Amino acid sequence: MATPFSEAISRAPLRTFSVVTFVICMLVLIADGMDAQLLGIVVPIVVKEFATDNGTFGWAVMAALVGFGLGSWGGGWLGDRIGRRWSLAIGTVIFSGATMGASLSADVWQMAAWRFVSGLGFGAAYSTAITLTGDWLPERWRSVGVTTISVGTPAGGTVVGALAPTLIEDFGWRGTFMIIGAGTMLMVLFIVFFLRESPSYLLAKGRTQEAHAVAANVLDGHFELVAEQHAVGRDGNPTGVFDSGLVRVNLGVGIAFAAAAMVAYGMLNWGTTFLTAKGIPFDQASYAVSLGGITSMVAAVLTGLLVHRFGSKSVFLIIAIGLVATMVVLAAKVETMSNAPGENERLLVIGLYGLAAALFSAAIAGMYAVMTFAYPSACRSAGIGFGIFVARVGAIAGSGLGGRLIDVGEGSMLPYFGTLIAASALVFAAPLIVDRHVPPARLRGA
């Protein structure tokens, strides 16, 4: 009996080929994170060399975010046209090459241009790596896999944070950009020689013979595959992202993902600012942001396990409730904190910050599990790209508005936290609007 590839691979044991695909995609996103976060590390050095100020140089930082949003959607679209493997390779070439190109920048605007191009590559690689991972994993590992791989980018930031000081000391910031860019370019070889297009994608494109040949990497014996359900619309053409059957998915994903990203970037980019403004020493404020990075990665992996077990709708409901409650408590505590807070007050605020980071990261990671399940194979790459695009809109809003809202408060953090609490409430769009959630394990078994 003919079956979709996702059903056939879910009946089979986890194969080496699937694990290799996951590992290579994870390595690509770690490389993505290294290139993406390198500029943030060298900002003080570059600002001094360019004889500019932090505000002006912020355009170069924001350029990568804009490029990321456009690249994720464009790369996802390209992945559904020419294949996720080739789109991933192209995205990697772009961000690695542009990182090397950025070493040649002579002023802020040249750096901004190179970082915009880098962002296009970052986004294209990110969306297609997640799609390809989800395509090649059995259902029981899919949610865990796509949420785990989403931490590849922050993990890359951790790696480059450890390597950069030594490289900068030996080769300067320009040499460091060249070395990191050239090193991450090696990922293209792994993509070309070891990755393969998923059978689900090939079947949706009518390439049945090729799909069966590739599927033999993970399926044994004789098998017959057919295109995924919903991969073809009523008109006989492959389903698109804006198909009428995906309206609630697009709406729920768009609102919730943008809102979660706005909270995340508003907190991560301005955390040390609001904490130090309330009397917490810089070293402890910096520790709070580092703690948020750790809790974010742990929460992302845990979210995948919970979504697999209990389904995405119930998990998202708990995440949304927890995020709003935590942000309200954190806002109240920061607003009423004394100008010279004691150790217990500082530890409580830092702990609440870490908890908030875990929850908004859980929301972001959970979106990848939902999108991988909700979008059919024919448009999954473009669907994930669309989700990442709207998330970048939220990220830019959080990054750009955070400082202004803190200034508007003139000592009060209510405008800042009030905006982020309102954004947190919009995460409820995921459990309340999306109509294609990952079902609980007990229902999948039934």
Image (spheres, rainbow, N blue to C red):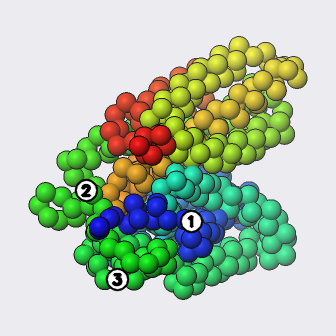
Q: From the image, tell me which residue sits under label 1.
A: 14
Instruction: Name which residue type carries label 3.
Output: Glu
Q: Residues within 10 Å of mark 2 (few under 14, many from 20)?
A: some
Q: Of marks 3 and 1, which one's residue comes earlier in the chain? A: 1
Marks 3 and 1: which is nearer the front?
1
Q: From the image, tell me which residue sits under label 3.
A: 210
Residue 249 at what x, y percent from top left? 33, 43
Query: Marks 2/1: CA distance?
Result: 25 Å
414 sits to left or right of 430: right
Q: Residue at x 60, y 69 (%)?
A: 19
180 sits to left or right of 360: right
Query: Marks 3/1: CA distance?
Result: 21 Å
* Along the viewing direction, whichever of 424 and 270 lies nearer the viewer: 424
Q: Of marks 3 and 2, which one's residue comes earlier in the chain? A: 3
Instruction: Name which residue type carries label 2.
Output: His
Query: Marks 3/2: CA distance?
Result: 21 Å
100 sits to left or right of 161: left
Residue 199 at what x, y percent from top left? 38, 73
